Amino acid sequence: MRLYRRTIKLFTDRKDWVRQITVTALASGTAWLLGDTFIKSGGVVAAIVCALSIRISLYKSVREGFGQIVGTAIGASVALGTVSLFHFGFIAVAVTVLLCSVVARGLHLGEVASVNVPVTALIVIGPGISGNTALHRLLSTLVGAGVAIVFSYFSHGSTPKGRTTDQISRLGEECATLLSEMAEGVAAGYVASDAGKWLAKGRVLIEEIPKLRAQALEAKRYARWSPLEQSDVADALYISGVAIEHTIVQVRTMARTLFDAAVDKNNFMSGNSELAQAILDCSSAILTKIEYVAQQSNMDQVDNVAHDLRLVGRVLADHLFELARSVDQDQLVRAVSLVGNMDRIADSLDESSPALKDVKTPGEPLSSQVLELNPYQQGKRWRRKIVKFFKTVTGRN
């Protein structure tokens, strides 16, 4: 019975993962059934494409599915051409992969589609390749991608907005917990090894920023075309995501400052009760903001929380300036920089800083997009090249 409970607990503790793999399995099975029913020998290709295309969200599955379709179309065309010239064999396979990679690079396909092009070409180039077979496999790809898009809607029990809110809450709580540990350590008298642990945790938080940004961007774009979401709410949530990103950076910087101070023998911050209380107040302010974001209510009270945190920073600054003549100047500068970090966190709490709204936040990296350049931009570029070529040939300026 104990073993049975432990086994069940392994799955109940991972409900999201269980849901995703179950949906993926059902989607692949459905893709095989539909592909084999409506297309001659199309079940296997449809199932493969479905398993490759389905992702943890509807937005990402649409993007992956489009990448599969683009890759298959290019791969099928190149495969038919090379097999007709060299027949099936070593040369045909090598030339197919080479040409597919060149074409993907020339079209500025992103990393996802660039990988799909040679992979789908090799699927198409299998024994018995012909124009009819290539068409069947292309249609199977469409079936697999379509099934993946439909089933991806059920991969999560929450909406993109809900997942973004959960990530903001989780990262905010981790920031507050880390600040609380730092405050406790400063009050008790910390050493470099303690500060090193805080800095390591701060670096782990920094690694979460790309995931948060991608999730917030997904919620924002999902709200643009889905009638189930409000665009203004998603935009506000996106700014909250940028704000927590800035908060994470400041928390990591504070951990680095305390570490730099600890490796200096003149560390007056260790055991400083005023500094410890200020850091603890900063932790409490972040927790309060996270509660407001999760409840989506009383957001006007965040202004009061940020105002109180700024007052805490000013009181700490006054205390530090009183110690100016009795402490090492380099250490004093480090301590004063903590006040600046708290002010920036306060700006992120009430989202009043122009850095959050006036500076464009980068989206996903180009490597994760299906098309690094949109078709309109690519068309303009190729048109300029064609015009330049004809002018060179005809000798006209």
Image (cartoon, rainbow, N blue to C red):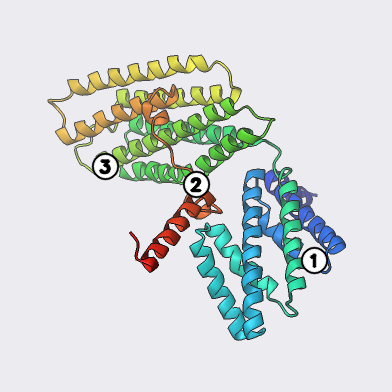
Q: Secondary structure beneath disc 1? A: loop
Q: Secondary structure beneath disc 3? A: helix
Horizontal and vertical percent position of residue 250: 37, 35
Determine the CA span between mark 3 and mark 1.
62 Å
Measuring 57% from the left and 80% from the top, which residue is drawn there?
94
**Nearest to viewer (mark 2 / mark 1):** 1
Measuring 55% from the left and 62% from the top, which residue is drawn there?
114
Specify the amino acid type for callout 2: Glu
**Nearest to viewer (mark 3 / mark 1):** 1
Specify the amino acid type for callout 3: Asp
Q: Locate residue 6 relative to residue 296 in the image: left or right.
A: right
What residue did someone put label 3 on? 260
Other-residue count near label 1 (Cα within 10 Å), few / some / many at <14 / 14–19 / ≥20:
many
Measuring 54% from the left and 51% from the top, which residue is drawn there?
375
Judge by depth and name the residue closer to the eye, 234 or 75: 75
Specify the amino acid type for callout 1: Gly
What residue did someone put label 2 on? 364
Q: Locate residue 42 relative to residue 230 in the image: left or right.
A: right
Q: Secondary structure beneath disc 2? A: loop
Judge by depth and name the residue closer to the eye, 144 or 213: 144
Answer above or below: position of 282 versus 131.
above
Measuring 45% from the left and 42% from the top, which residue is drawn there?
205
User: Which residue is most to the left?
Assistant: 325
What residue did someone put label 1 on? 42
Judge by depth and name the residue closer to the eye, 144 or 201: 144
Horizontal and vertical percent position of residue 380: 47, 52
